[in-house]
Amino acid sequence: MLKKVYAFLMVIVATILIPGVVGVPLGKSSTKILIPQLPSVSLVKTQSIKNPNLDIIVQNQEQITCLAKNIYFEAATQSTAGKLAVAFVTKNRVDSTHFPSTFCDVIYEGPHYASGHPKRDRCQFSWYCDGMGDDPREGYGWRNSQSVAKWFYDHKDRLMDITDGATHYHANWMQKFPKWSKKYKKNVTIDDHIFYKRSYNF
């Protein structure tokens, strides 16, 4: 009898003095259950971090693609010098206050219909408004134009201009040259293009 009383008292004392220990009711097993004390966790609100460099990469790629198309349709069959000359004319316009400030805007400059299509024969580079498709054919010509455009765009601020600042050009095989060719300064002929610079200052 005394042993039972003693055991009962020990259970009560353990329940009171030892945190996390729960005694079981009389008549049940005397096994005790330990309740683990979990550390408190504070939730921290996180926010996504935007990478500004990603936007720059996307914008640059768009400009390179526009330049590659201009090189392809204007000088795909010409030498590397001929392709670079077209690229320089495009850049010279970008750098001029008389033209739009990006490669894509310079290349696609001109009146457009409400549908977004350019008006026929009223753009800056004839391939864009000649009524024909503007999707390059996969092959060496397009790959090479893309390669030249990428290299030029990445080094454009460190290159010597082989057109001497030209902002205009036309093919030398034209039966009738543009009217502006009589007013602008003729700079150089590269492959079958004649390059001109307008008399205004940049």
Image (tube, rainbow, N blue to C red):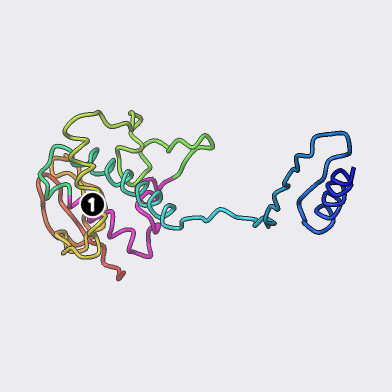
Quadrant location, the N terminus: top right
Q: Nearer the viewer, residue 193 or 36?
A: 36
Residue at (29% x, 47% y) in the render: 67
x, y percentage for residue 93?
Answer: 31, 58
Q: Nearer the viewer, residue 120 or 151?
A: 151
Q: Nearer the viewer, residue 124 or 56?
A: 56
x, y percentage for residue 169?
Answer: 21, 51
x, y percentage for residue 60?
Answer: 36, 52
Say whether residue 107 is magenta.
yes
According to the picture, the residue beneath numbered tag 1 turns out to be 87
Residue at (30% x, 37% y) in the render: 127
Residue at (35% x, 47% y) in the render: 61
Residue at (17% x, 52% y) in the render: 85
Please tell me whether residue 94 is drawn above or below residue 77 in the rendered image.
below
The local secondary structure at tag 1 comes to helix
Q: Is residue 197 left or right of residue 34?
A: left
Q: Nearer the viewer, residue 50 or 80?
A: 50
Quadrant location, the C terminus: bottom left
Q: Main secondary structure of the magenta part?
A: helix
Q: Which residues are magenta?
A: 84-110
x, y percentage for residue 178?
Answer: 24, 48
Q: Is residue 171 left or right of residue 56?
A: left
